[in-house]
Image: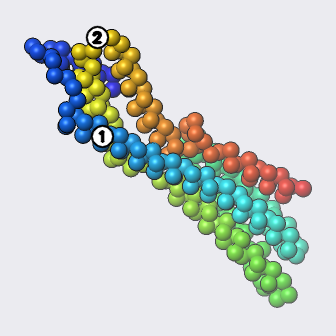
Amino acid sequence: MLVCAQWGRTSVLRQSAPAETSVGAIDGAFLGLLGLLLAFAFAASASRFDERRKIAVDEANAISSAVLKFDLLPEPERTAAKTTMRDYIDARLEYGKKLSSGMAPEMEWRRTKDLQNALWRPLRVVIGKKPHAPIAIVLMPALCQVYDLAATRHLLTKTHAPFPVVGLIVALSLISAFIAGRAMATIRMHTVVYRNLYSLAIVRTVLVILDLDHPRLGLIRVDYTDLALLEIKADLSH
């Protein structure tokens, strides 16, 4: 953006009569379109961030609720369910760690699916015992909620601002810097400061949008929600 701003300024200064440097209608349309795109992209990224945070908290609450209901199971199914749930929580924690390291968590997701199937086994055994069948039926909705939230969270990790939108914002940012450079061509005082402030403001806004879209990689994060899973795992160990 600084290069484009300097390019715009130089293009005006090289003219024989560099008097008209005010922002025209077309230039204003470019700047307005950039502002509109930044506003919509920021709102969409913030909405996805809030949804990811909510899903992570809801998943931890659903796991905690399912763990409490495990106490209704008879032995040895109760111990088997709690042991499998500890492994399941470990898989979810590893899933989050992979996301925080910028790696694809596909292996952890497959392990999560395998452990979900393993959690059904104690329930199938209990359902086969007619006196305890109603207890298993009570547990089934709790586990289904755990599975549904895990699937929703997995899909949200793949949902980001579309690449064409990001590319358009970058292109319009460069064009706007060129326009700003032309507009400041005849201003003699503090032009370098203005160009730097303008570029910094736009670039920082774009970075915040991308940061909100990757909440385990940047400064705005949701990985603190893993603490809830660690607390549940600690309770299971007692």
Visible residue check, residue 160? no
Q: Residues within 10 Å of mark 2 (few under 14, many from 20)?
A: few
Name the residue: 33% across, 26% down.
1
Element carrying mark 2? loop
How far is disc 1 from disc 2 in space, using C-alphas? 26 Å
Amino acid at circle 1: Gly
Q: Which residue is mark 2?
A: 188
Q: Amino acid at mark 2?
A: Arg
Q: Residue at x 26, y 32 (%)?
A: 175
Q: Position of residue 118 (x, y in %)?
A: 71, 68
- Quadrant position of the C terminus in the picture: bottom right
Numbered tag placed on residue 32 in the rendering: 1
Up the image or down, 149 lies above or below 32; here it is below
Locate residue 12, reporting x and y percent: 18, 18
Classify 77 as above or below 57. Answer: below
**Mark 1 or mark 2: which comes first in sequence?**
1
* Residue ID at (80%, 62%): 83
